[in-house]
Image: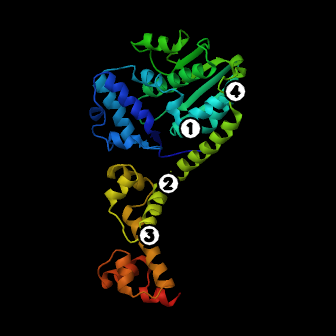
Amino acid sequence: MAISNPTTPAQYVIILLDLARQRGVSANQVLQNTTLEESSLASIGARVNEDDFQILIENAYRLTGDRALGLHLGARLNLSAHATVGQAFMTCENLEQVLNFLLKYYRILAPALDLRYEQRDGRCWLIPETTDPAVRDEFGHELLFATIVYNLKLLVGSNEVQFRVELPYAEPDYVAEYEAQFGEELFFGARQGSLSFGDEWLAAELPSSNPALLALYEQECQRLLSDLVDQDNLSDQTSQLLRKLEGHYPQMPQVAEMLNMSPRTFRRRLAAEEVSFQQLLDSVRTEHATHYLKTTSLPLASIAYMVGFNDVSNFRRAYIKWTGMTPREARDTA
């Protein structure tokens, strides 16, 4: 299930901003050159688009000077930071059920991630085929692996789980930070990144297990994942929004803001779908005008006004351009 326009949960950004504050950097500094405001991140279910997330990360690197930023952020993303998915993890029976749930729903947390699971040689392997292409490779692996390690230890209530970490880049000069997070089984310069641990931990029972609640959380995760997939097509999102705003069609920058993105990102994503905002607007106005023409006896002046025209002749010309027939011809074919 591919999600071609990934977004990041806003709670991760809130924690990143707090991490920056602890290093003497204000939220406004980290948010510079993005379309975001700190107040907008606090709404439930808010998400951050890929362009803004990339800028946030680069700002945080530059301003904090923290080269191990991915490791430090990952170690702050506890179960509550993952919202409904994190709550679901806690209600699982054992670690094997947690991993199965993770593989079904990880794209709610990281839509750009492509994660593979293998069980071989007495070990469980989590292998990212891709991390987030919007951020540097080290950050993506650090964040993913630090988050997984931290939360698996929390879930089983033990620091005795031993991890093997392979990373597809050269050993950095802050390797001591890796050792503090993962232990000594570190291998840099690997062909592919991977994280593994002994499969004897799969049967580890979770003290917070609650099967009844898990069923409820899974229903919500199914809905969240479905919403992400449904929203992947920006042209459909835009058309649906314009239909809801019938008679009050906003300008493109306003629509972009309503969809939580900058006008530049909005235009770029529509262009990738080979459509323009004006085409979508004209299509929706055609739908509305045709509906009024065929189902009401309203005069043309009223219909013209309802679809955004102050002049009947301009509406007539536009309708001919949209449909190849005059408004009267459309009404007569009802």
For image coordinates 46% across by 24% down, the residue present is 76
For image coordinates 41% across by 51% down, the residue present is 269
- On the question of residue 135 being in view, the answer is no
Earlier in the chain: of badge 4 and badge 3, it is 4
Q: CA distance from mark 3 to mark 2?
A: 16 Å
SS at mark 4 in the image: helix
Q: Which residue is mark 2?
A: 233
Q: Amino acid at mark 1?
A: Thr
Label 1 near label 3: C-beta < 8 Å? no
> In this image, 92 relative to 61: left or right?
right
For the residues carrying marks 3 and 1, which lies nearer the camera in this image? 1
Q: Amino acid at mark 2?
A: Asn
Label 4 near label 2: C-beta < 8 Å? no
Disc 1: CA contacts within 10 A as few (<14), some (14-19) or many (>=20):
some
Q: Which mark is residue 84?
A: 1
> In this image, 277 relative to 154: left or right?
left
Q: Which residue is mark 4?
A: 96
Q: Amino acid at mark 4?
A: Glu
Q: CA distance from mark 1 to mark 2?
A: 24 Å
In which image quadrant can residue 244 be found?
bottom left
SS at mark 2 in the image: loop
Earlier in the chain: of badge 2 and badge 4, it is 4
Disc 3: CA contacts within 10 A as few (<14), some (14-19) or many (>=20):
many
Q: Position of residue 137 (x, y in %)?
A: 44, 27
Q: CA distance from mark 3 to mark 1?
A: 36 Å
Disc 2: CA contacts within 10 A as few (<14), some (14-19) or many (>=20):
some
Q: Which residue is mark 3?
A: 284
Q: Position of residue 18 (x, y in %)?
A: 36, 28
Q: Closest to the observer: 50 or 15?
A: 15
